[in-house]
Amino acid sequence: MRFWILLCLSALLTVPAVADIFSADDLAVARELREQALAGDGGYEIVADLTTRIGPRLAGSEADPRAVAWAERLLTEMGFDRVWLEPATFPTWHRNLERAQITEPVAFDMVTLALGFSPATPAGGLEGEVVMFDDLAALEAAEPAEVKGRIVFIRNRMRAARDGSGYGPAVQARSIGARVAASKGGLALMIRSIGTSSNRFAHTGTQRFDADTRALPAVAISNPDADRLERLIAMGEPVRAEIEVDAEFIEAYTSHNVIAEITGSKYPEQIVALGAHLDSWDVGTGALDDGAGIAIVTEAGRLILDLEQRPDRSIQIIYFAAEEIGLWGGRAWAEANADNFHNIQVGAESDFGAGPIYEIAARVSDQAWPVIKAIQAELAPLGIELGDRRASGGPDFIPAAPYGMAAIDLRQDGLHYFDYHHTENDTLDKINPEELAQNAAAYAVLAWLSAQSPIDFGSGETLLDEEAARAAE
Ligand SMILES: [Zn+2]
């Protein structure tokens, strides 16, 4: 009896040395996967086919079911052990036209895109004086009299950064700018595109969806047009603009997550989940966002599928539906797994373009952190360093966080990602197959070693309890 207690205690308390976590055989397979992936194209043919055959695929558009059928067929033909669809229902929207022009003191057309869920203007458009704000906070602080009856222009400029950290602060203007402008009696919202390019492309994107969001027509203008507008306003004369949007709102549409599984040989019920999202914006062809992610995780799965052995745990490749307009596929997946998160070992989504991965970060239990270190040791030849213990797993796994899902981020160099994000310019030529292969190599190694880890990653109560304890410190 005492012996067993001691044994159990030591099992609980002893964290193995990083070098001893994986067997020599498992490490040999990981290294083989890494080399094979680097010798390949990272799934470039997959993203080439998706962007050519299907093209842009906004959730709920005519391309949505074609993309789902394409995905189901691809994954089935690749020989995954199981392929299935999981429904997700959501509100959606589509654009017919948009135009934005400065009319006074000088007339010029701007390059523009309506923001997701923008209502239509009256036919022929609306016209008004432009009032400019530095950012959302300035608009929030404004007196209603400044805003009433005017076209609100938010000029904040997104900062470029490798980790994409400029996006969060800037995107507020897009997410809820129209709602705030409407609350003060504004006529319409016009924002400087949330993007880092100096080319003349507008960046669309969704607004946070709720009933109030649809209160005002909302558009983004290209960075160079926003620059000219700012200079014009600085000259001091009243500036007037005309905006026209025609768009339709769709109350409810049902699409599908497409899921493929490599069934584990020892613990088939335990799942390592790799994700990417299948939908894209309706402009460009969704090559970087997120055709690249689809290619990367699929290629990682294909390499593992080609091994002579099955991994211990199951590996699932999840193509999420309707990420762009509100993480609807991610929400549906989290709800479907609400009672199963103790079995979802870990989740990692590729959704940041095709730039090389430079760091691994993870939200896992204390017990599992040495596993992350051991995985990083196998990623080091790819130029990947050890990051911190904060990770979301990617946008579609955010809805899984309240369930305590362990998550891993393979952080990509995104310095140029927001040059193309949500624009007509997000096309296949922006993807470098060698960088894509580095990504596929990292995901293959990650998925394989996560499936072989002798230590549980702590999803569910363990992780929630540890996080609560850390937060209380
Ligand atoms: Zn995306």
Image (cartoon, helix red, strand yellow):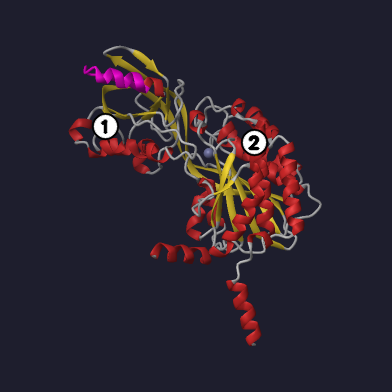
* Residue 434, quarter of the rendered image: top right
Q: Position of residue 469 (x, y in %)?
A: 43, 66
Q: Are marks 1 and 2 in contact (CB under 8 Å)?
A: no
Q: Is residue 188 visible?
A: yes
Q: Nearer the viewer, residue 228 or 49?
A: 228
Q: Which residue is mark 2?
A: 436
Amino acid of disc 2: Leu
Q: Is residue 57 above or below residue 365?
A: above
Q: Position of residue 338 (x, y in %)?
A: 54, 60
Amino acid of disc 1: Gly
Q: Position of residue 240 (x, y in %)?
A: 27, 19
Q: Is residue 103 above or below residue 423?
A: above
Q: Is residue 363 left or right of residue 71?
A: left
For marks 1 and 2 on the same chain, the one whose residue lies earlier in the sequence: 1
Q: Which residue lies at the image location 68% right of the left edge and 62% below the top edge?
A: 20
- Residue 391 magenta: no
Secondary structure under the numbered disc 1 in the rendered image: loop
Magenta region: 226-243
Q: Is residue 14 above or below residue 334?
A: below
- Residue 239 magenta: yes
Q: Quadrant of the C terminus?
A: bottom left
| Residues packed near mark 2 inside 10 Å, few (<14), some (14 to 19) or many (20 plus) | many
Q: Which residue is mark 1?
A: 186
Q: CA distance from mark 1 to mark 2?
A: 45 Å
